[in-house]
Image (cartoon, rainbow, N blue to C red):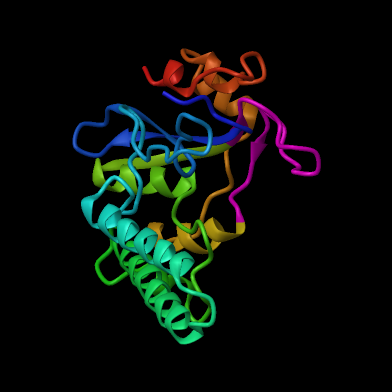
């Protein structure tokens, strides 16, 4: 499992299961985990952690097949003889169409757990911003809805290491929802978002797993060490 280069937003949702009232704690990481070697494709999945909203990811054959096609077109563009501008233009248009088509299918595959609700409808009339639906908070809300959990509190914090100079995020600090989630979460919940739990309150609620809330103690830990 990959180390988390440059830090990672983690989140937790606490609530009770509707069918029996049992206490439930859900956990999620933002985006995907980085891969080895650094820069390689990572993973959207980790056992015990909330799954991504996207139903189509680079783990799927459809994605891989399209990626191979775009790579082949890129090679063909590079091999075109000088002066064959029309051929290069046609190949670039074909590559752009493939990439845009894949992006549209990925966006349409996001499960917002509400019939008729899509990323396009949530952000309309504006374009869907990059990374929408990939934050830890969105994963937690979807997991809670699918597992029949009534949310009582949710919180996100930056873990493992500070962002590079100027990035503004410090390891171990709790942060409010980003601008993308402030638009998406109310639509997924069907109601106004609650304020995130304070760090002190969250520490008390999760006293049995204090390492979750003390990433500054293990700033270079591997996320798989937290998977239990």
Q: Residue at x 60, y 34 (%)?
A: 157
- Verify whether residue 107 appears in magenta: no
- Of residue 6 and residue 72, the one placed in the foreground of this image is 72
Choose top left, top right, bottom left or bottom right for residue 35.
top left
Is residue 55 in view?
Answer: no
**Relative horizontal placement of residue 35, taking residue 199 as reference (left or right):** left
Image quadrant where residue 199 sits: top right
Which residue is at 27% across, 72% downward? Answer: 116
Nearest the viewer among 157 and 204 is: 157
Q: What's drawn in magenta, residue-wise?
A: 157-178
* Residue 45 falls left or right of residue 215: left
Q: Give residue 165's position: percent from left, percent from top.
A: 80, 38
Residue 186 visible to the viewer: yes
The residue lying at 48 percent from left, 59 percent from top is 132
Residue drawn at point x = 31 percent, y = 56 percent: 68
Residue 228: image location, x then y, percent: 36, 17
Give the percent coordinates (x, y) of residue 17.
Answer: 27, 35
């Amino acid at each position: 499992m990959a180390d988390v280069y440059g830090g990672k937003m983690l989140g937790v949702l606490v609530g009770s299961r509707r069918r029996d009232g049992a206490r439930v704690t859900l956990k999620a990481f933002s985006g995907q985990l980085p891969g080895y070697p650094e820069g390689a494709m990572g993973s959207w999945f980790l056992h015990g952690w909330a799954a991504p909203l996207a139903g189509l990811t680079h783990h799927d054959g459809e994605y891989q097949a399209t990626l191979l096609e775009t790579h082949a077109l890129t090679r063909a563009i590079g091999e075109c003889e000088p002066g064959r501008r029309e051929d290069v233009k046609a190949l670039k248009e074909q590559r752009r169409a493939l990439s845009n088509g894949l992006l549209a299918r990925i966006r349409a595959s996001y499960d917002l757990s509400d019939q008729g609700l899509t990323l396009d409808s949530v952000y309309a009339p504006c374009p869907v911003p990059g990374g929408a639906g990939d934050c830890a908070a969105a994963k937690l809300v979807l997991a809670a809805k699918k597992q029949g959990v009534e949310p009582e509190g949710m919180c996100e914090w930056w873990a493992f290491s500070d962002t590079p100079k100027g990035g503004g995020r410090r390891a171990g600090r709790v942060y409010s929802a980003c601008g993308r989630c402030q638009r998406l979460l109310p639509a997924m919940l069907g109601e106004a978002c609650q304020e995130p739990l304070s760090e002190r309150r969250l520490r008390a609620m999760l006293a049995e797993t204090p390492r979750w809330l003390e990433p500054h103690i293990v700033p270079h830990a591997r996320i798989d060490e937290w998977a239990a």
